[in-house]
Amino acid sequence: MKTQNILIVGVGGQGVVLASNLLAEAALAAGYDVKKTDTLGMAQRGGSVVSHLRFGEQVASPLIPAGGADVLIAFEKLEAIRWGHFLKTDGAAVVNDLAMPPLSVTLGSDVYPCDAEIVAALERFTPEVHLVPGTAAASRLGNAKMVNTVLLGYASKFLPIEAEKLASTIEAGLPPKLRQPNLVAFETGRSMYLR
Amino acid sequence: MERLLLSGNEAIALGACHAGLKLAAAYPGTPSTEILEAIAKFPGIYSEWSSNEAVAVEVALGASYTGVRAMACMKHVGLNVAADAFMAASTTGVRGGLLIVAADDPGIHSSQNEQDSRNYARLGKVPCLEPSDSQEAYDFARTAFQLSEEFDTPVLLRPTTRVCHSKSVVIPSPKLEPARTPEFRHEPGKLVMLPGAARERWHKVLERWEKLAAYTETSALNRVVEGSAELGIVASGIGYQYAREVFPNASFLKLGMTHPLPGRLLRDFAGRVKTLLVIEELEDFIEQSLRSQGIAALGKEIFPRTGEFSPDIIRDSAVKAGIISNAPAKSLPAAGLARRPPLLCPGCPHSGVFFTLSSLGHRSTLPGKKPRTPKMTICGDIGCYTLGAYQPLGVIDTCGCMGAGISQAAGMAKAGAAEKPLAVIGDSTFMHSGINSLLNAVYNQAKICVLILDNGTTAMTGHQGHPGSGVAATGQPAPRVIIEELVRGAGVRNASVVDAFDLKAVRAELRRAMASSELEVIIVRGDCPTLTRKRGRPRVISTEKCDDCGACLLIGCSAIKKSESGGIIVDPGVCVGEYCTLCQQICPKEAISESIGVAA
């Protein structure tokens, strides 16, 4: 198998690192060589967070080259376009339909793009752009924080790891009381995928 | 076969543990912090957050003198603080293996510079190991202890941010040995560096150096990966991994030990390839050594000497230099996007005092109004509160290194600055080195105003303990140094404590201290909200009373934002409510209140 490149992006506090850790453990359990890397440090304070995950026969660099991501999972829309240029021309963008305007937008010195602009910006790189109402779905399930799992469920349609393996890794990586709700969230994400 | 997915930092911790580590000391600093955090979870190893990096190296060196294996961890700039102790360790040598980890930060993800720590290895004539992934981080940490004892030297392990914060597969080796029993042997000629003994020891250091130079020629730390004779690449650290992606057919001399360098191995390798490249992040450390031996190589004239490398950067540089021609079409990032800089968290105790400084110091302006000329000189320091430099607060005028703010303010006052300078420092940084500067300010009668922002933890790096926190590295309770007692004990006559969330008190105290002609210390106390995780009832803005003046936006609180219809709202998902209430206190229309009974 060619090395798979998954880029997960979002805003500090959204659980980007946890989501990529879960995917990485699933890839490890599937027997692949795995490398992943996160931007940490200052980014924890509400900054932009990006996590690179690569797996395959043998992986050298933990960083994905621009234009090299098979899947981009974005927990926030502005972050999706910030990292859109990492998408392959046949890659898939799975974008949570959530806007978290930066302070500069609140203060009026910047503008937050509208949905049409966001989709158009991503379609410059790939036709496979999915704007997913993940936060709304997670809220309906009773916990907006499970948006990560909903998105992972949706994105699993593009990943060469069996859904059962992903689900069992999510289960193993979470505290007991969060397991069942997250499995439901994962399945919800999977069922939201419609072509 | 056990396969673990570990970060570089976790791998260093596990490798050291499996090498029979007995003691670890560190001061937190990105990207090194998680090493000690991981070690603190292993049973049977003593771990501590030391008050600063020099102390950490001294504690580890003391342990080494008793024959046990010890380590000290820090970020690159921490090694500046620890430089004296590092040189002392080099001079006396060790008993038990001594590993010093200095994690470099190419690209300055979370630092004040990107200095290359390998220069300290050269200065101290100490071996330097550079891992390129977690497996090497694990292996090299183990090897470092053997090298340390065999050559009677501390060993410098230099990972970089990308190695520290990348996870990759580690296959652990069997545990080497259990931790030894400590036993100190009296040997003044080795351990008491009076000039006579020190002169002798430096000869020993030079002899050690010769032996290390011979060792590195045949060490398994350096290895050749055979490939095409057209292109040979000498690489170290994460640069090696990137180079393998970009030049899959090249020959490689992969250096795990970059100081001392294997001269003969390098010459042999250079002689077997047509073009020789050196790929190393930051300085031309390896390249310079090649040059000094008369070996022609292409390095920093092609690849950048600042910033973090990536496969893209290496490929672009090689294409530009004509080394490779098949460049794929490049994807460019979207232009003009709103930036997302890091912010103080909702409920941060620094927000109120910074808002007050901002208003007293004419730093922020309501949206649409003309900016004013700033008043007050505010010397900053290193921690979360450095983020006060960003708009809309804009209240940090200097920030260079740990503990510097108080001394800089003193220098400004002594130089004759017209306005009383003010220094802002966090509790952990104050314990680290700010206390030294305060002692100096007392002794030399500097008329400055010092704000110690006490949130009870080392917040920026993820809530590590310090002498004023009451928490040990293991999470157990620890004795607590009371900052106001320490300050008064240091001879400060005017020291006060104010509640960080009482804006009236903060403003009154600041005004008083700035008007006084004495040295004034104000301890602004309030818990870090991401440590306590206390969540109260969120505030709500009455749409009837709010006239959109924007005053609340000037706190820079990320819970306060514009709604889609244009009005200002408080995000109930992140507001900490009654544990903060800053916005409520400053709203001129009294439009902000507790959410109970108010229609949102």
Image: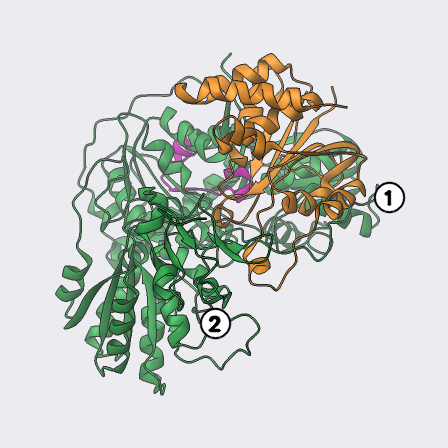
Chain colours: A orange, B green
Q: Chain of mark 2?
A: B
Left or right, A147 with respect to A114, comes to left
The residue to which callout 1 is attached is B325
Label 2, residues with CA under 10 Å away: few <14, some 14-19, many ≥20: many
Instruction: Give x and y (percent) for residue B101.
Output: 42, 42
Let me know if residue B438 is in the magenta part: no
Which residue corresponds to mark 2? B364
Looking at the picture, tell me which residue is in the foreground, B79 or A145.
A145
Residue B145 magenta: yes
Region rendered in magenta: B144-164
Residue B559 tag number: none
Q: Position of residue A155 (x, y in %)?
A: 66, 26
Disc 1: which chain? B
Q: Nearer the viewer, residue B74 or A84?
A: A84
**Residue B328, position as x, y percentages in the image:** 84, 41
Q: Indicate left or right for B375 with B234 as reference.
A: left
**Identity of the residue drawn at 78% across and 44% down:** A120
Residue A18 appears anywhere in the view: yes
